[in-house]
Image (spheres, helix red, strand yellow):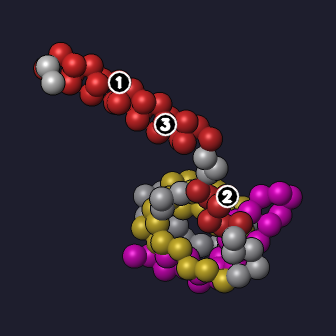
Amino acid sequence: MEEKTLLMLSVVFAMVGLSVLYGVFVNSEPLQATFISKHVDETVSVSGRVVSVQAFDGRTEFTLLREDYVSITFFDTVNVYEGAEVTVVGEVGEYEGRVSIVGQIFAKD
C-alpha cells in the first residue's frame, strides 16, 4: 500500500476508536454507584485518601477517594484530615437516596 493510503486508514481508525471511547465514557455509570449499591447492608473495608471532611457535634463525615468516591459517616468524633490515607470498615447503607458507609473501625495507613 502507499504511504498516503496507510496514513488515511490510521487517521480514520484513530477517529473511530476515540469516538467509541468517548461514547462509553459519557454513557457509563459512576463507579461509586456501581460499587456501593451492590453491597447495601453488608460490612465492607475500603482504603483511600481523604478528600473532604465535615465535623459536626458527635458526627464526622468525610469523602474517600479510591478509584471512585466513597462517602463515609462516623457517629462519633474521628480525628481525620484531608490528604490522610485511611482504611475504614463499616456497613453500607442508604439514607434519603444516598448510598454511603457508616464507619465502625477507622485506621490511618
Residue at the image position 80 percent from the left and 66 percent from the top: 94
User: In the rendered picture of this protein, how many numbered marks are placed on residues?
Assistant: 3
Q: Amino acid at mark 2?
A: Ala
> Mark 1 sits on what residue?
12
Q: Is residue 36 visible?
A: yes
Q: Is residue 33 above or below residue 80?
A: above
Q: Amino acid at mark 1?
A: Val
Q: Earlier in the sequence, mark 2 or mark 3?
A: 3
Q: Earlier in the sequence, mark 1 or mark 3?
A: 1
* Residue 34 x %, y %: 65, 61
> Mark 2 sits on what residue?
33
Cα separation between marks 1 and 3: 12 Å
> Mark 3 sits on what residue?
20
Q: Amino acid at mark 3?
A: Val
* Residue 61 x %, y %: 66, 63
The disc at residue 60 is none
Q: Is residue 12 left or right of residue 90?
A: left
Cα separation between marks 2 and 3: 23 Å
Residue at the image position 66 percent from the left and 83 percent from the top: 43
Mark 3 surroundings: few (<14), some (14-19) or many (≥20) residues within 10 A: few
Q: Is residue 16 above or below residue 89?
A: above
Mark 1 or 3, closer to the camera: 1
